[in-house]
Image (cartoon, rainbow, N blue to C red):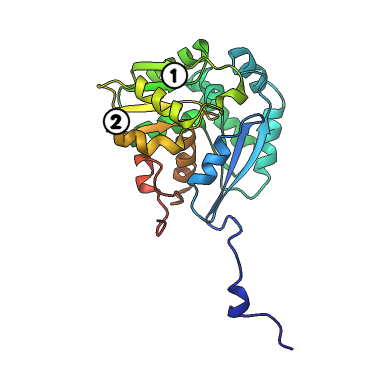
Amino acid sequence: MSLPTGTQARAGFRYDGYGTLGRLGLIYIASSIVMDAEWAAMAAPGLSVHTTRLRLPKVTLEGIDAMMNAPELEQSARLVGSAPIDVMCFGGTSASFVYGTAYDTGLIGRMERWAPGVKATTASTASLAALREVKAGPVALATPYVDSIHERAINFLESNGHPVLKSGNLGIDEDWALAEVPLEQVFDHVVACDHPDATAIFISCTNFRSSGVIEALETALGKPVISAVQASFWHCLEVVGIDGARPGYGRLFARRLAPGIA
C-alpha cells in the first residue's frame, strides 16, 4: 500500500492563516472586540494578527489613566513581543492621544525597549501618518467619545496641523457599548460630521466599527476617510514594508494592496 504523499495528497490542504506574509502584534483593550476582527477582515492571506490585552475600567479620562499607569501595559508589550512578530501596535487611540504627542511618541519608545528588535507604533501615531499619506489638511472628526475625550482628540489633531472644521461625538463611556453601534449609525454619524472644506474625515476609537463603511463613505462624500482601526493596520504594513491589505477598505491602502487579491 502506497503512502499518501506528494501532489495528490497536498491537494486536500486548506489555508490555515499562518503568517507567511507577515505577523502583526496588537496590544488591545480586554473588553474590546472590533479592532482585531477588522484587522483580520482587511488582512490578505498570509498576514496574521496576534493580540494581547489590557483592562480598561471605563472610557473616561480616569479610566484611561488607570490603564496606562498599570504594570500590565509593560507586561502586555513583553508578552506579545516574545512571539516572532514583525511589528507591534498599541491599539488604543484615546489612550495614546489624551496626554499629547510627546507622550504618544514616548510610548512607542517604551514598547520598543520592552520588546527589543520589534518595531512599534500606536493608533494615534498611525492615524497622523495616515492623514499625511492622503495629504490631509483641515479635517472633520467623528467619535463615539464623551465630551472630555472628544475635546482631547480635537486638540491632538489641531496640535499636529489638522484644524478640525466640524466634529461630533456620541457620548459613550462604556467600552462594550462602543462596539454595539451598528454600521448604519456609524455611516450616518460620519456623514453628519462632514464639512465641505474638510480635506479628509477622521473616525477615532478602536472599538468603534468603521472599516465596513469606509469605501461607501468615500464614495458618498468624495474625500478620504481615515479611521483609527484602518490607519493602525495600514501603518503596521507601512512600517515593515508589507503589501498585505485586501481591496475595499479605502484610498489609504493604494500602495499596500496585496497583489492578486480580488
Q: Which residue is mark 1?
A: 156
* Kind of residue at badge 2: Leu
Query: Is 70 left, or right, of 163 in this rendering?
Result: right
* 112 vs 180, nearest the viewer: 180
Marks 1 and 2, the one that precedes in the sequence: 1
Query: Is 103 left, or right, of 225 in this rendering?
Result: right
The picture places residue 152, in percent across and down from the top left corner, at 48, 15
Q: Which residue is mark 2?
A: 221
Q: Image quadrant for the N terminus?
A: bottom right
- Say which element carries label 1: helix
* Kind of residue at badge 1: Phe
Q: Residue furthest top?
A: 148
Query: Of the numbered discs in the image, which one, if any, rests on residue 205?
Result: none
Front position among marks 1 and 2: 2
* 17 vs 125, nearest the viewer: 17
Query: Is 76 left, or right, of 227 in this rendering?
Result: right
The picture places residue 26, in percent across and down from the top left corner, at 59, 38
Residue at 58%, 73% in the rendered image: 11
Q: Is residue 77 visible?
A: no
The residues tagged by marks 1 and 2 sit, at their Cα atoms, a distance apart of 24 Å
**Circles 1, 2 touching at the beta carbon (< 8 Å):** no
The picture places residue 49, in percent across and down from the top left corner, at 58, 46
Q: Residue furthest left?
A: 197
What is the quadrant of residue 19 in the picture? bottom right
What is the quadrant of residue 14 in the picture? bottom right
The picture places residue 248, in percent across and down from the top left corner, at 39, 45
